[in-house]
Amino acid sequence: MFLSMKKTCCWFVLLCGALLWLPACTTVPQTGRSALHLVPSSQLASMSATQFGQMKQETPISRDLQYNAMVRRVGDRIAYVAAPDMPNAQWEFVVFDDDEQINAFAMPGGKVAVYTGLFQVAKTEADLAIVIGHEVAHVAAGHGNERMTQQLLAAGGAALIQFSTADMESERRALLMAAYGAGASVGVMLPYSRYHECEADEIGLLYAAKAGYDPRVAIPFWERMAAQGGSAPPQLLSTHPSNATRTQKLKALMPRAMQVYQNR
């Protein structure tokens, strides 16, 4: 009787998941890839706005007029060409004062941050456009929603395994859960993270080209960024593609980006 109930519950969970799956599928702009978004975009945007507001209170904001003007100019141009893909985005571009952080990030809804350390590598507006295009692309593609969806599904899978193995020996159960966790991370989460980075490179390169920035600066820019990072873990265990993979893909994309740049 107990086993029958467990099977019934498992099938019910799988059925619910299938019913949620269909209406939650969306198409990524520019690439046409299908993606699963289980979290309402408005909810993610609201959460991001709150978190970003807290970060602005806790992290010094740069007062460098040149940096701020440069980020606003580039950000506005990238946001303008990306607007058809994100008509409801509330864009905000902020420069945080931290010379040790050679980085930038974006949050769902349109919150984009650039650290002052990035200007050690991004010497021109075209360089900065590659970065901001990449970050805006993460938002346009809904990568934050897709990652959260994957985490929810992984947590649901773990809960399902725990429920269905309640009568299993504790050691075997622990080994099974550890194997599931490792498999979900190395087999799903990390590959998708690397794919998201490559997809953001592609979409961001097109945004930069549409905005009037020479896309050919992307390869030397990312090579300089890679040189700042020191040794990297094997690609299999990394959230980002290897430098060689990134360069190879950018070279393959360059003819399309150049056509967009020349025909804008």
Image: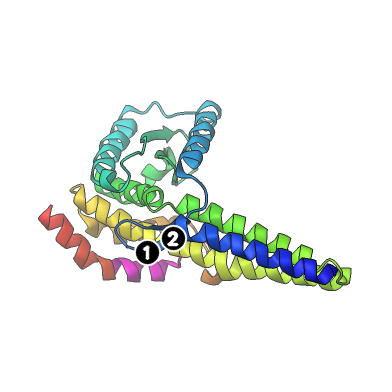
Kind of element beneath mark 2:
strand
**Can I make out residue 85 in this image?**
yes
Disc 1 to disc 2, how far (Cα)? 6 Å
Q: Which mark is residue 35?
A: 2
Residue 216 versus residue 211: which sits nearer the camera? 211
Does residue 213 appear in this view? no
Q: Kindly indicate the quadrant of the structure image that contains residue 172.
A: bottom right
At x 35% / y 59%, what residue is drawn? 201
The secondary structure type at the circle numbered 1 is loop
Q: Around disc 1, counting alpha carbons within 10 Å, would you say few (fewer than 14), some (14 to 19), or many (20 or more)?
A: few
Magenta span contains residue 242: yes
Q: At 17% across and 61% down in the image, what residue appears? A: 258
- Residue 256: % across, % down: 20, 65
Tell me the residue that label 1 is attached to. Answer: 33
Residue 181 is marked as none
In the rendering, at what x and y percent does residue 26 appear?
40, 57
Mark 2 belongs to which amino acid?
A: Ala
Quarter of the image where one finds residue 179: bottom right
State the residue at coordinates (72%, 63%): 9
Left or right: where 225 falls relative to 66 = right
Tell me, yes or no, whether the two marked residues, 1 and 2, touch with CB atoms within 8 Å.
yes
> How far across and down, in percent of the image, does residue 70 sit?
28, 36
Q: Is residue 205 above or below residue 2?
A: above
Residue at the extreme front: 1
Q: Furthest-left residue in view?
A: 263
Q: Which residues are magenta?
A: 239-251
Q: Nearer the viewer, residue 113 or 138?
A: 138
The x, y position of residue 25, in whole percent, is 44, 59
Q: Is residue 91 magenta?
A: no
